[in-house]
Image: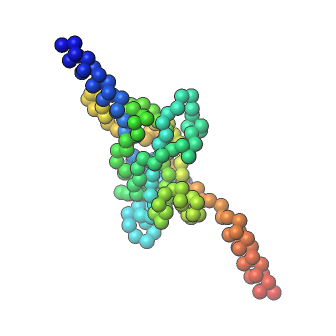
Amino acid sequence: MKKLITLVVLLASVAYLQAQGTVNFANAAATRVNYSASVPVLGGTGVQVGQFTVGLYYAPLSAGATPADVLWSAMSLLTTTGIAPAAGRFLGGVATTPSSTAGGVDAYFAVRVWQNTFASYEEAAAGGGYRNLTTTIFRNATGNPSSVPPGAAAAMSGFTGVNNVVPEPGTIALGALGALGLLFIRRRK
């Protein structure tokens, strides 16, 4: 009987250790993805719409650290989705953290948005995509699917929305524009 009780306790503790946190990767109307402060990014298909990917990034919670202390390079991509079903909204489903974050424990998350013509946000930023959207890193609780009864995935309550961040043109682009301006002025004289 003692062996059976010991085995049950060990199995229960191992199951708890392998539990991973879950987050509902979706936003609300108040936390839209916007071109500017009030113009939402269009979703669906077509020439002007459906051209953005939304990614959920994750980093484990570290003792004493704040979201400002977490480096983007330390975050890993959990999952991606597109802008749908409405402008500025995304429904990416339930995202599960790696085993470094147990269910019910806080972790750091961030949402990044980039053009579909690039494979990743990092590639879009390096390639000069005309729309590189990003958000700050936020701390959020995770759901615990291993609890009894199973817990639901946690809402992204720390997410405040995404507004457009347009990168400045490069030095070569500014030089080319300046040269074109000088040629235009010279030609008019």
- Identify the residue at horizontal 26%, vertical 17% (top origin): 6
- In this rendering, would 143 be left or right of 60? left
Color scheme of the displayed model: rainbow
- Identify the residue at horizontal 38%, vertical 67% (top origin): 45
Q: How many numbered dots are placed on residues in this image? A: 0
113 is higher (above) or lower (below) than 22: below
Residue 132 rendering spot, x and y as whole percentages: 55, 58
Q: Residue furthest right?
A: 189
- In this rendering, would 138 be left or right of 91? right
Front position in the image: 3 or 9: 3
The quadrant of the image that shows the C terminus is bottom right
**Quadrant hosting residue 83:** bottom left
Residue 182 rendering spot, x and y as whole percentages: 77, 78
The quadrant of the image that shows the N terminus is top left
- Identify the residue at horizontal 50%, vertical 52% (top origin): 112
Q: Residue furthest front?
A: 3
